[in-house]
Amino acid sequence: MARRTKEDSFATRHKLLDAAEHLFQLQGVSRTSLQDIARRAGATRGAVYWHFKDKADLFNAMMERVTLPMEASFNLSDNDSDKAGTDNVDAIYLIRRATVKALLQIVSDAQTRRVFEVATHKVEYVEELQAVRLRHLTIRNGFLSRVEQGLDAASRQSHIKLATPSATAARGLHALVDGLIQNWLLDPEAFDLLAVGQCVMNVYLRGLGFANEQESPMPSWNAAEPARTHKA
């Protein structure tokens, strides 16, 4: 009986998160109450508070269930992470591979796309959602740190001096990719996110002095693919 109760609790939690996803996308986070979410999930308001401290806690749990693409893609494997800041792995290849994975995940997975739309277009960082804002900043800062580290390694590997500090270059790449994703979510029929994203990323990296796509082919999005060793 105890096992069944645990299974029921798990199912209820996921029903609440499913309901939150759809309601947040439909009417925005601020305009969706916990009672709305409970009603759609066929649960009670008390059930919401059993599983989540408040709306921000529920929102972050929803995000964690479907990790944001940029967070997932730049969360390198242990092997890649150990080498990302060294000269042993093609650092630009890792940046390209991670970006392609992120774009492909958004294009091909409906739930990821829905959650990302909520996170970018349907949330206001009002007082009750400050925990959501802090999580967003943590994800962004982690991305920037990874890319800055990769650009520094790539600069050493290619024996070039970046025209701008790597921290600034990392912010530029983030703004470029994040901006494309947000605009595509507004109108997915306007352009091919994967094709345009790869093209403009290559233009940006070429502007920093790195090999273009023909000289350094776009990587596979497969997360299981091993990191490519840099040849001196």
Image (cartoon, rainbow, N blue to C red):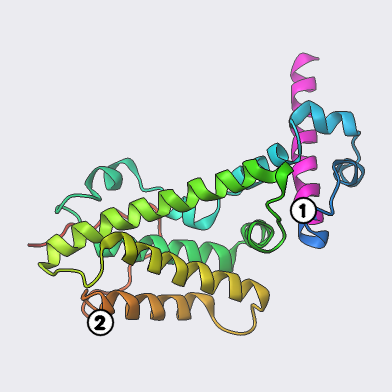
Residue 145: x and y, percent?
35, 51
Residue 171: x and y, percent?
39, 63
User: Considering only vertical position in the picture, is 174 above or below 22?
Assistant: below
Question: If you read the primary sequence from the N terminus, does the residue marked by circle 2 or circle 1 appear first?
Answer: 1
Quarter of the figure with the N terminus: top right
The residue indicated by pointer 1 is 29
Judging from the image, what secondary structure is the residue with disc 2 in? loop
Q: Which residues are magenta?
A: 1-23
Between residue 215 and residue 86, name the one nearer to us. Answer: 86
Residue 11: x and y, percent?
77, 34
Q: Residue 129's quadrant in the figure? A: top right
Side of 15 where 40 appears, left or right: right
Q: Amino acid at mark 1?
A: Val
User: Considering only vertical position in the picture, is 3 above or below 217?
Assistant: above
Between residue 174 and residue 98, name the one nearer to us. Answer: 174
Pointer 2 local density, CA inside 10 Å: few below 14, some 14–19, many at least 20: few
Residue at x 31%, y 59% (from the top left corner)? 167
Pointer 1 local density, CA inside 10 Å: few below 14, some 14–19, many at least 20: many
Taking the magenta stretch, the answer to whether it contains residue 5 is yes
Residue at x 21%, y 58% (from the top left corner)? 152
Residue at x 70%, y 56% (from the top left corner)? 123
